[in-house]
Image: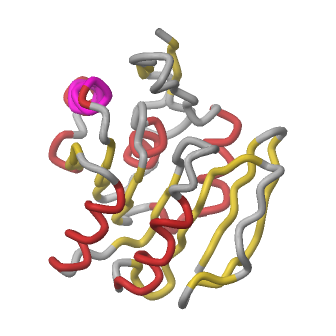
Amino acid sequence: MKELRITAGTAKGRRLKAVAVSERSPLRPTASKVREAVFNIAGPGICGARLLDLYAGTGAVGFEALSRGAGFVVFVEINPVRVELIKKTGMELGFLTHMKVYRMQAFEYLKKACEHGDTFDFIFIDPSYQSGEVMKVLPLIAEGGILKDGGMVMVEHFSKGMLPESVGSLRQKKRYIYGDTALTTFK
């Protein structure tokens, strides 16, 4: 079990547990320097924002957002062990009233969110680097109306992999490199 810490905000320094449930389901938590970069890129707009954390894993990005003043975070994770850990961590950090956790595939959640008219200011996508999931979910986000006007989509991916300049109505804005990790933003 790995331990991570929240880097800023009301829960700064608090520990998060990370569980790799099997070799087939490895866990690659977003490194603290990359999490800090996520919020430096997002800027002050995170305060009060509705955030969607797809492929949430440990929930580190969503919890970091809540610690920094996000209004509400939806965590989407398929692994039941990780879902329970996210719920437990939310309770321990006192964030339960500002979060919801869904145990389902990201694509299925997005279809449901589109049907219900759910919208978000910030969408963070961090699937397994080799999964091909990014290109399954970006088109649905682009055409589903779930990103609020002025909102941002951020994808964490392998730095040697390139994402398209545009996907539907989404346009790539910038790409940031941190070792083997890239953060690519779309608006």
At x 50%, y 17%, the residue is: 23
Is residue 83 highlighted in magenta?
yes
Residue drawn where x is 74% and y is 44% of the image: 181
* Span highlighted in magenta in the image: 81-89
The image quarter in which residue 110 lies: bottom left
Q: Quadrant of residue 134?
A: bottom right
Q: Is residue 9 left or right of residue 109?
A: right
Q: Quadrant of the C terminus?
A: bottom right
Residue at the image point whose x is 80% and y is 39% from the top = 180
Q: Is residue 178 left or right of residue 170?
A: right
Tell whether position 138 is magenta: no
Outermost top residue: 1
Majority secondary structure of magenta residues: helix
Question: Closest to the observer: 146 or 115?
Answer: 115
Where residue 184 appears, as percent x and y from the top left, is 69, 63
Q: Is residue 142 above or below residue 3?
A: below
Determine the residue positioned at 50% across, 30% down. Answer: 6
Q: Is residue 61 above or below residue 52?
A: above
122 above or below 101?
Answer: below
Query: Observer-nearest residue: 167 or 97?
Result: 167
Q: Residue 169: x, y in percent?
A: 54, 90
Q: Quadrant of residue 141?
A: bottom left
